[in-house]
Amino acid sequence: GSSMDAGGAVALTSAGDMQLGTVQSMAATGTALTIQSGGAITGNGAAVNLQARQGGATSLQATNDIGSATSPLVVDVTSLTGQSKTGSAWLHALGDISIPDFETPDGNLTIAADNALNANMLTAGGTGTLSSGAAMTLGTVTSAGDLLATAGTDLTATTLSSGGDATLTAT
């Protein structure tokens, strides 16, 4: 697999599909990683696709899918925002993750966090599937289809809206 390591911010832009190996930024402030694709964003099977744990934020923007159901995009980042304009998104977060805003207005949104998941605004045009290995704190979550949220410990939510069934589980 390929990798890119930077002491500062990284910005990758493609008019078409983008396949990522490992992209790492050590930026402590601002936006550490900016990934923009006019097509889909996928991983190449690397253990980590995006890594930014020094304090800088990560931004994902794609016209089509981000990750896939069988191969989610693997992120090890502190903060993540993003949008799949016409597709779905499948994300696997390796550590605690904060998501100020992520939307898939025309597709499904799946986020699996190994540790804590803290999300302020999530929007799915289809099914929303959220899981965490530790506490889950949700602000506003809107799903046009079913909504499934499973937390490893506590689950706290402010506003949840589902066009289908809503299942909330805290273990």
Image (tube, rainbow, N blue to C red):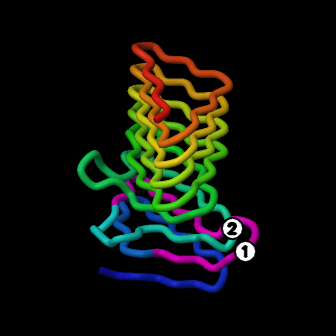
Residue farthest toward the left in the current orientation of the protein: 70
For label 1, the SS is: loop
Give the tally of numbered discs: 2
Label whose residue precedes the other's in the sequence (2 or 1): 1
33 falls in the magenta region:
yes
Q: Quadrant of residue 146?
A: top left
* Amino acid carrying mark 2 in the image: Gly
Mark 2 and mark 1: span between their CA atoms? 5 Å
Query: Which residue does the numbered mark 2 point to in the structure image?
Result: 56
Where's residue 17, x and y in %? 35, 59
Is 86 on the left or on the right of 139, as rendered?
left
What residue is drawn where x is 63% and y is 86%? Answer: 7
Q: Nearer the viewer, residue 22 or 38?
A: 22
What residue is drawn where x is 44% and y is 54%? Answer: 38
Is 121 on the left or on the right of 29, as rendered?
left
Where's residue 102, x and y in %? 56, 42
Q: Which mark is residue 98?
A: none
Q: Which residues are magenta?
A: 23-42
Where's residue 72, x and y in %? 34, 53
4 falls in the magenta region:
no
Mark 1, residues whose alpha carbon is within 10 Å: few (<14), some, or many (≥20)?
some
Q: Residues at badges 2 and 1 in contact (C-beta under 8 Å)? A: yes
92 vs 137: above or below: below
Query: Which residue does the numbered mark 1 point to in the structure image?
Result: 28
* Amino acid carrying mark 1 in the image: Ala
Where's residue 82, x and y in %? 55, 48
Q: Quadrant of residue 18?
A: bottom left
What residue is drawn where x is 36% and y is 74%? Answer: 21
